Amino acid sequence: MNIQGYQSQPPVEERTVVLAQQGDEQAFRDLYEKNYGRIFRLAFRYMRTAEDAEDVAQETFIKAYGGLRSFDANLSAGFPAWLNRICVNCAIDHRRKAKRTGGQGVVALDDLHYEPASPGPSPEETAISARAMSDLEDMVDNLSPRQQVIFTLRYRRHMDIKQIAGHLDCSEGNVRLHLFRSTLKLRHFFSLAALAS
């Protein structure tokens, strides 16, 4: 944009991406340092342990470095969104590998839910609620990795369909289809559990 003879400059991150695409290692290091914390937090939401989240974050930047020349800012919502998509895909792949090898993973202390002493629910009600949440977690783990991610974005992060589609770079119809299928599977799992008890 040209305002009174001044040419506007592209944003700093956009210039840094262009430099990194041209092979400037310091530019990529700057992108890494600026985005690592955010990518780690995103990976942690999916992986539940700091160790797995760190693996996914590192893999994200390795893949981003390898695919940086193919990144086109005109066809994307920007570099951070592109990194997010790579991170989510790496998390899905990591969970698939863990599922194939039978890895259960370690539960992070932050994932444990403690009920404060209060005049609220009784210990029995708390135990029933905790058991129901545990059963739901187990059932969600039986969904496909893609369905797990979409279910998490919709019902834990409370994103709408359009936001999920943008986050995963897929159509809204695809998101709805995965939500529908995951809901059917969960209903089926719950009905089997009810019959067994």
Image: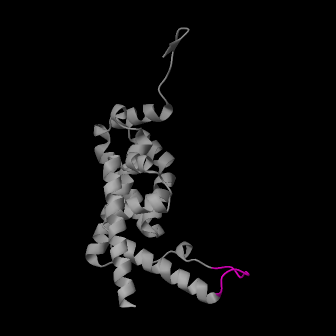
Q: Is residue 146 left or right of residue 117?
A: left
Magenta span contains residue 78: no
Q: Residue at x 30, y 79 (%)?
A: 102
Q: Nearer the viewer, residue 135 or 48?
A: 135
Which residue is painted at 51% across and 54% down in the image? 37
Q: Is residue 61 above or below residue 91?
A: above
Name the foreground residue: 6 vs 144. Answer: 144
Give the main secondary structure of the magenta stretch.
loop
Q: Position of residue 175 (x, y in %)?
A: 35, 53
Tell me the colour scheme of the image: one colour
Q: Position of residue 46 (x, y in %)?
A: 43, 64
Asked if residue 60 shows in the view, the reply is: no
Q: Is residue 46 left or right of residue 66?
A: right
Residue range (magenta):
115-122
- The quarter of the rendered structure image containing the C terminus is bottom left
Residue 88 found in image quarter: bottom left
Residue 67 in percent (x, y) is at 29, 44
Residue farthest along the left direction in this orientation: 100
